[in-house]
Image (spheres, coloured by chain):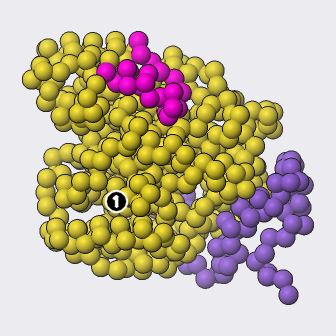
Chain colours: A purple, B yellow
Amino acid sequence: MSDPHELTLEELRERIRAAGVTIAEHRLAMVRKLLADALAPVRALDSRAIKTVEPAVKFTARREASDE
Amino acid sequence: MSDEIAYATIAELGARYRKRDLSPVEVTQALLARIDKLDPILHAFVTLTADRALADARAAEDALRKGDSRPLLGIPVAHKDIYLTRGIRTTGGSALLADWIPEEDSTCVARWRDAGTVLLGKLITHEFAFGLQMPGHRFPAARNPWNLDHIPGGSSSGSGAALAAGLVVGATGSDTGGSIRGPAAFCGIVGLKPTYGRASRAGVLSLSWTLDHTGPMARTVQDCAYLLQGFAGHDPADPASSRAPVHDYVAPLGRDVGGVKIGVPRNYFFDGVDPEVGRAFEDALGTLRELGAEVRDVQIPSMAGAPSFLLILMAEAFAYHERDLREHPELYGEVLRERILTGALVTASEYMQAQRIRAEICRETAEVMKSVDVLATPTAVKPATPFSQAQNPDFGFPRSNMPPFNLTGSPTLALPCGFSSSGLPLSFQLSGRAFEEGMVLRVGHAYEQATAWHTRRPPV
């Protein structure tokens, strides 16, 4: 059974089509590894488990107050 | 010229200038001669500004005669070539900007200029601070003075090489995922990534807005402190610039580190660490213990998610470069082009989840920093990579210990802690609480004074 976190070559091609960019066929394996390594923590994440509410826009009347 | 002058510190030069037994013009002429001799093999400089340097040096001499006591007066420096310089080309190490001459100085360049430094020129950077120049590129890659067959690290590659070879006294670098600390580690010098918001990014080519940091590189911790002092502080031109007070970074350096609490995060930072790096790091901890610091292990479990920083970096880099990439793809190096284009493949949701992981890393790190003053970790997991590997298009983006502190924005200092059996420098990094550059500099200085790694010279 395939790894649910795996980035398949087919999915990579789909992303390239959707983004409207061109990446040479002989470089796809490299790009796939680069993206898959970076995606691994995100794909392993249960997004419901993170309690942080960031990012959030902060509104402050005085700039100084937001700098500390 | 003697090595004594080429490797003099800022304090040593200042003292000799004021005793009148050495002048900024003499030092500048000597460094220009050394650059003329060594740079053809090192390729650290992309643009040399000899006339400007001599004019700056003469102006510094005049000021010294009038009793000017600014510490950076007459100190020869050079800038990473992503810092905009008025009237001097700023290439970004790229073919796209190979002939671009900006009309304004970046804030950091202007502040060092106003502090009386002597501008020797512009230092090569990896292309747009993200892609090592491959053979055939418009600009050759800088070489490592410790071994010309190895990279000097990147992206502040010229800054690292020039400092190690004694071509400049100080340099600017920028650090998005380790670009100050990596060259510092590979070249056996010192590099400080200040807190996000401490040093202005205005007028510096961006790689990734939320991760980019500007900072100083030098050969000693004290020199880094002087150089940071020269440009730290609020800049209205940088929206992320902080109004937090700027402390005196130099004066506290002599204080001992007795009782200072040092945390060693044992998860993530030791995966894949070369045994020689590991031994040098443990020896450094031993030295710090002997100096009176309290060293203990800590855990930051969310660091396991740190590799997702690349999603943030690549997506933001694509946003910055998209138009030029679509209109002039041929002016980008192939490997850099595909790295940035990969940013176009990151979905909005994935980018946001990476930022949420980042928030968790920041939260856990801040929690740990309530019980320790600094974190210590190896800087690079291995010594400098050979060009034969790094210039292989399939080399990829190696795992690194440096990006976690770009995610947190914490001030982080890289400094030498030994040499490999093949003679390449090894390094460790000290990371502190936000805006506590003084603490990491103090601990780094105490370690440096107790060791002699920073006094070794490369064989060029």
The answer, for residue A66, to whether it is visible in the render is no
**x, y percent for residue A64:** 36, 48
> According to the image, label 1 marks what residue?
B418
Name the residue at the bottom extreme: A1
Q: What's drawn in magenta, residue-wise? A: B30-51
Q: Amino acid at mark 1?
A: Gly
**x, y percent for residue A62:** 39, 48
Badge 1 element: strand
Q: Is residue B243 above or below residue B118?
A: below
Q: Nearer the viewer, residue B305 or B151?
A: B151
Q: Image quadrant for the N terminus of chain B?
A: top left
B221 sits to left or right of B136? left
Q: Nearer the viewer, residue B434 or B84?
A: B84
Q: Is residue B222 above or below residue B358?
A: above
Exactly how many numbered labels are in the figure? Answer: 1
Q: Is residue B134 above or below residue B385?
A: above
Q: Would you say residue B46 sits in the magenta stretch?
A: yes
Q: Quadrant of residue B345?
A: bottom right
The answer, for residue B331, to whether it is visible in the render is yes
B288 sits to left or right of B238? left
